[in-house]
Image: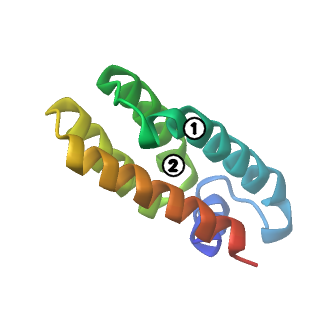
C-alpha cells in the first residue's frame, strides 16, 4: 500500500524513495481528516450530500498519490451515495476505516 504510493511518487514526481516521506505524511493527514468527517456518519443518519463531498476529496488525493485501493473504495462510496444506497454506503464507510487502519499499521 505505502509501497505503491512511493512507487507512484517516484515515477510521477521523479523522487527518490527517501524524498517521499513528507508526501506520505500529507496523505495520512488528508486521509485522517476525511475519516474525521465520515465518523459522525458511521452510526448516525447518513447525509448523502456530505458523503459525496468527502468522497470527492478522497478520490482526488488518492488518485494523485497513487493509492488505488482507496481510490476504488472512494468511487464505490460516491456511487452508493449518489443512488442513494444506505447499506452500500455503510459497508464502504467501514471498508474505508479498515483501510485507514491498515495504512496506519503498515511499517
Q: As drawn, which residue projects farthest toward the top?
A: 49
Q: Residue at x 69, y 58 (%)?
A: 14
Badge 1: residue crowd in 10 Å (few <14, some 14–19, many ≥20): some
Q: Residue at x 78, y 60 (%)?
A: 20
Q: As drawn, which residue projects farthest toward the front?
A: 44
Q: Is residue 7 visible?
A: no
Residue 47 at x, y = what percent?
35, 24
- Find the distance from the CA under tag 2 to the CA under tag 1: 11 Å
Name the secondary structure under disc 2: helix
Front-most of residues 55 and 6: 55
Return the residue at label 2.
Answer: 62
- In front of the other: label 2 or label 1? 1
Return the residue at label 1.
Answer: 34
Front-most of residues 59 and 95: 95
Residue 5 at x, y = what percent?
60, 64
Front-most of residues 21 and 17: 21
Name the secondary structure under disc 1: helix
Quarter of the image that includes the C terminus: bottom right
Q: Is residue 50 left or right of residue 40?
A: left
Q: Is residue 1 left or right of residue 47?
A: right
Q: Is residue 66 left or right of residue 23?
A: left
Q: Is residue 49 left or right of residue 22?
A: left
Q: Residue at x 33, y 20 (%)?
A: 49
Residue 75 at x, y = what percent?
31, 46
Quarter of the image that includes the N terminus: bottom right
Mark number displayed over residue 78:
none
Q: Residue at x 49, y 41 (%)?
A: 58
Amino acid at each position: 500500500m505505502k509501497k505503491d504510493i512511493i512507487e507512484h511518487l517516484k515515477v510521477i514526481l521523479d523522487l527518490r524513495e527517501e524524498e517521499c516521506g513528507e508526501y506520505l505524511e500529507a496523505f495520512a493527514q488528508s486521509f485522517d481528516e476525511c475519516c474525521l468527517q465520515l465518523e459522525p456518519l458511521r452510526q448516525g443518519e447518513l447525509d448523502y450530500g456530505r458523503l459525496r463531498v468527502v468522497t470527492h476529496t478522497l478520490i482526488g488525493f488518492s488518485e494523485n498519490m497513487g493509492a488505488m485501493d482507496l481510490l476504488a473504495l472512494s468511487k464505490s462510496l460516491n456511487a452508493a451515495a449518489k443512488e442513494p444506497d444506505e447499506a452500500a454506503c455503510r459497508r464502504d464507510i467501514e471498508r474505508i476505516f479498515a483501510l485507514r487502519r491498515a495504512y496506519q499499521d503498515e511499517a
